[in-house]
Image (cartoon, helix red, strand yellow):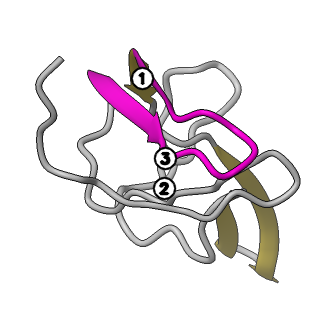
Amino acid sequence: QQRGIELGRGTVVDGNAIIQLHDVDVSKNYTIIVTYGGTTTYFANETVGPLEVLKLNVSLTPSVVNNTAGNVSIKVDVDCLFEENVNNGTVEIYLDDGETLIG
């Protein structure tokens, strides 16, 4: 298997190495080559396998921040487990009939 560009490297601690990849296209499948260089105790090894990059899930938490008659303001927290702040996209609010856009 021909190796491409090295994406990252990490030190093995307690049987695991964590390598963070940045600027990876989401909703895409890759084939990766993973190598372990070995030590005086362990042989080197290499494996080829799939890497599926998925979009991140978000949670939505609405709350009323102003309840003046005829002028209600709703704050919607858009949270992601793996990021501090979600900064893109649009939030829409519908009545529970699923059709009427109210904000």
Q: Are marks 3 and 2 in contact (CB under 8 Å)?
A: no
Relative to residue 34, is residue 60 depicted above or below? Answer: below
Q: CA distance from mark 1 to mark 2?
A: 35 Å
In reply to whether residue 37 is colored magenta, the answer given is yes
* Mark 2, secondary structure of its residue: loop
Q: CA distance from mark 3 to mark 2?
A: 56 Å
Kind of residue indicated by mark 2: Gly
Q: Which mark is residue 11?
A: none
Kind of residue indicated by mark 1: Glu
Crowding at mark 2 (Cα within 10 Å: few <14, some 14-19, many 20+): few
Q: Position of residue 4 (x, y in %)?
A: 11, 39
Relative to residue 25, is residue 52 depicted above or below? Answer: above
Pick whichever, 56 or 61, lies toward us.
56
Left or right: residue 81 compared with residue 15:
left
* Mark 1, secondary structure of its residue: strand
Residue bearing mark 3: 37
Q: Nearer the viewer, mark 1 or mark 2?
A: 1
Q: Which mark is residue 103?
A: 2
Kind of residue indicated by mark 3: Gly
Crowding at mark 3 (Cα within 10 Å: few <14, some 14-19, many 20+): few
Residue bearing mark 1: 52
